[in-house]
Image (tube, rainbow, N blue to C red):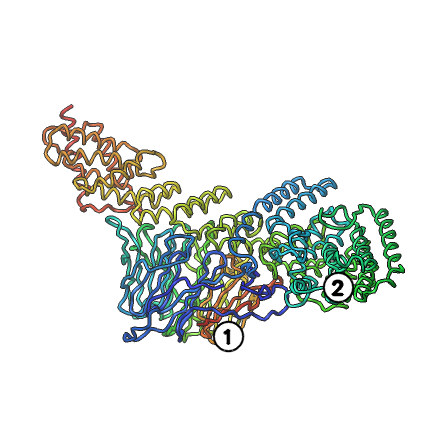
Amino acid sequence: MEKAIVTLEINSSCTAWNYNGQRLAAGSSDGTLAIYDSADPASSNFSCASKFKVLETSILKVVWVPPEFGDAVACIGSDGSLSLWEEVVEDGDLIQWKLCKSFKRNSSTVLDIQFGVFSTSLKLVAAYSDGQVKIFELLDPLDLKDWQLQAEFENVIESASKIGQAFCLSATISWIPQRVESQRSSFVLGFNSDVPQLNSSKVWEFDEDHQRWLPVAELALPEDKDDRVLSVAWAPNIGRPYEVIAVATGKGISIWQVGSNPDSDGRLSLERVASLSGHNGEVWQMEWDMSGMTLATTGSDGVVKLWQANLNGAWQEQAIFEPAT
Amino acid sequence: MPGMASDSGDGNTSLVQYSPNPQPITYPLHHGLKPPISRLSISWARGNTLRVTVLRPPQPSAVPEEESGGSVVEVKIGDDGDGEIDDAQWRRIAYGSVTPFALLQSRKNSASTLSKMSAFDNSMWSQHIMEYSAEIKSLLGAPKLSYKSPIDNPKEILEDIRKPTCLKAAWELMDIFYADQQSQAWIPERLIDWLADYDCLLSGTQSSVHSKLVDFQKELVALQAVEDHPKYWEAISSALAIGWLEVVVKLLRLHGSYHYDQLGSRETENGLVEAVAVLLSKMPRLRPELKADKLGECYKSKPDFMKAWEKWRAQITKLDCSSFWLQCEHEETRSGLKSVLQILLGNSSSLSNATQQWIELYVAHFLYIRPFMAGLESMYDLAQKCMQMKPVHEHKLIRLLIGILGENPEVIIAECSRSFGPWMIAHAAELLTVGNIQAEILLSEPRYKLGGMCIEELNRLIYAQILSSHALTWQIAPIYLSSCMIQGMGLLETVLCKQALQNNQVLLKTIEICRLYELDVVSRKIMKIAGVHDWKHGKKGSGVFWLQQVRDEVRLSRIAKQLFDFVGKSVSDESFKQWEGLIELLGSESGTAGGLEFLNKYRDFRRSLHLVNSGVATDAAQKAAEALILLMKNPSTPQRFWLPILYDALKLLNWPKYPLFDVSQTNLMLNKLQELSMVKLRPDFVDADLPPEALNTVRLALGTNLGRAILKE
């Protein structure tokens, strides 16, 4: 039933698969990045195709750039740096991975990033350790060098309220999964920080008319608003009249149904349809399958769980995968 | 919902959809790494494939024996894997079922466009369903050979055949009750046949008549004078109870009284055995036909059958009361044959003793007690009765049968998807809904909690998702997805966008599917991905081709800029050759070039200019001037290149011997420059990489040239 398809090198610290599951990028604690490829789309034998030094410190997270912008990855380092690397063939047939952008650093460090494609432009949301959220936009679709800071804000609903110095341990971002004809630019973001207002996951949407980002929903019950958010995952929507977003906090995993269009005061209708026990320990990661009907999660209890709703809409834990030697 | 975790070996471990509070099943995930494990991460690949990265903690540098730092393990969720059908066979079934499914869908669509289903349509529809079911049935395996009497080995009572699959048995059950309208009148007889074919599947944990016969077969080889052994008579009774008449006759003929040396002394005994054998081989059956090698006599109409039945029963009774029994000296034969007669006479306790499982007893009832049984309700009552008399076997086929007899579509749907997998439910739902309003509503009612789709669609989506996980089957997923009105196209888009597009064959196939389903937006995205990939991986011509197909003006104009810069710089360069072909390609098809065709003219211009620069005389300058005018007149020359081109041409503008451009030509260029100055004020203006004084230098040169041209004219 299970099959080992890649053996990773020693000191590997994180992995990421590209859009079609044909390439794996694996970061390591010594700052090298290895790319594993499979020659044939039908085969699941992967071997290391490229290996190069990205950082002097450990790589914490690797994220692939959407494929219509090239074969490229963004790397977050344990020093809080963020850099973009791209595979190109120049001068003959030599495949090279080139550094195309190193994002400027200040006192804060990058905690999480995600790419979103909005009509033809590529956007990058980055969440920082001081609670700031920055959105960059790619200027030239064929060149990953030039990025422009499009917006910068804090993850709060009422921007008037002043928050003090924030210290964030982690952040989690999930874009609305891209449907080819969809024109919405929206993502959900939550923090794990010492400032309660920042924490709860908020859905941000780009307001085309006024060219600004607006919070359109807060995915937390009134009594849970201060909970530190560990992971968010926006489910693919292949035809539902509503969106589904999973949010993991220390209390477990909540599944939210979110209306597709904002009401008159600019907010999306919300319903928490499930509150699941989650993991014994904290939730590390949540991933929806391509139909948006099965949620896979991992956590510090070291198991993978699958969650599905039954025909009556009740969410249930369906399977547990427990690593075994 | 979308499926069950597969497991090899035992089909019962799949996830339960219908039970109210299912306990999650824990599966081990073998990764082959030494502990400790520091982290897991997950990623969904195509379809329902989940990839789990298992990482070990970083090692201090001095541990050389450790070789791997982690492993990625792939798990297929919700596969049809109970191990009874291998992957290649599954793919054969998957591919084979596409045509019947698609044909049925198209017939359904054309029927619904006619809107009203008249009585004639209904019968037509039944005909379609029957054909559909028969085709699928034939896919699941060739019909099982019946028990023939092999001459070579008289002691082989059961033929050694390949074990049929539960999947086929399940399909056949659905076929009997829902699809095959012609057999509605003799469902009991079809169940008898069904059990004859599949009784061997039911003997997993519990013994069955089949397993009993198999055991006896093993002993038989070593037995002398079989009629002395009670097991011989038990085997005969059991086989008879479930209607395996051929086996019974064959066993009877092994009776010692048939031996030449004993015929004389055991004449009466042999006569009795033969009389029973003859009687049972003339058993009347209420069915249209029997296979050639089957014993019994068929009657299509009930009155004829009843007449024959009464007559046959009378003969048995007569034999039962015959005085010959008193002359039969062999005790075992007498009692054995007597119990055979009791079975033929429908003695319920004899039937119960001769059978192992309730389903066998059930079939025995059809054969000997209630041969006129009709209607699901009474069949269900009888099943209940039989279940009280025998332990109920927890077999998936039996659960399915109980669901069918109980007319409970929910149970049937749940059982089909739970025990037989997504393929089964996606295809069998069509049978279930024939003339069954309750099932129809259950399956096709839109449900908000399923995002507006119905259960039928959900099942197809789940199946399509499984198809799309494999490189050899994803191409047939669209056929199922296109029959899903609410969410099918959405999933199809995702499936297509997740293909291995860097592979040319896959790319072309994906684009073809997009065209077939009119998914223009998807194919644009796919071609864009391919174009960017090729452009950035040294396949520039192919990159431009795909981007031209999409008419991606933004990217093409960036490419034009790059080429322009390159052509501008490298005219004297050897590597110009490499670009020349590309420019040729771009220029050859005007219209699709997306602003690149002017590069062709630009190349001519640069060539002549190059000759001018290398000192070749006025002829070359004249040619370069002509090329420049052509470029300036050409509406496809992008505005942003006007100034760089003119700047390149400074030498021509300042040609010392005489002005190369006449008044109108100079005016044309001046107008372009004027236009450019206006544009420069617009916010989206992108400045070329030229010295800041470039514009003024060109303007001055043009002014001078104008003056000289006027003077010359």
Q: Which residue is mark 2?
A: B227
| Label 1, label 2: how far apart the Cα atoms are | 74 Å
Which amino acid does the dot numbered 2 rest on? Glu
Residue B377 in sight: no
Vertical placement of B367 versus A196: above or below? above
> Badge 2 sits on which subunit?
B
Q: Position of residue B350 (x, y in %)?
A: 80, 65
Q: Position of residue B313 (x, y in %)?
A: 86, 55
Q: Residues within 10 Å of mark 1 (few under 14, many from 20)?
A: some
Vertical placement of B506 versus B233: above or below? above
Choose between B215 and A296: the one closer to the eye: B215
Secondary-structure class at tag 1: loop
Which residue: 43% across, 51% down? B499
Q: Which residue is mark 1?
A: A251
Choose between A72 and B670: the one closer to the eye: A72
Residue B289 is left or right of residue B513, and the answer is: right
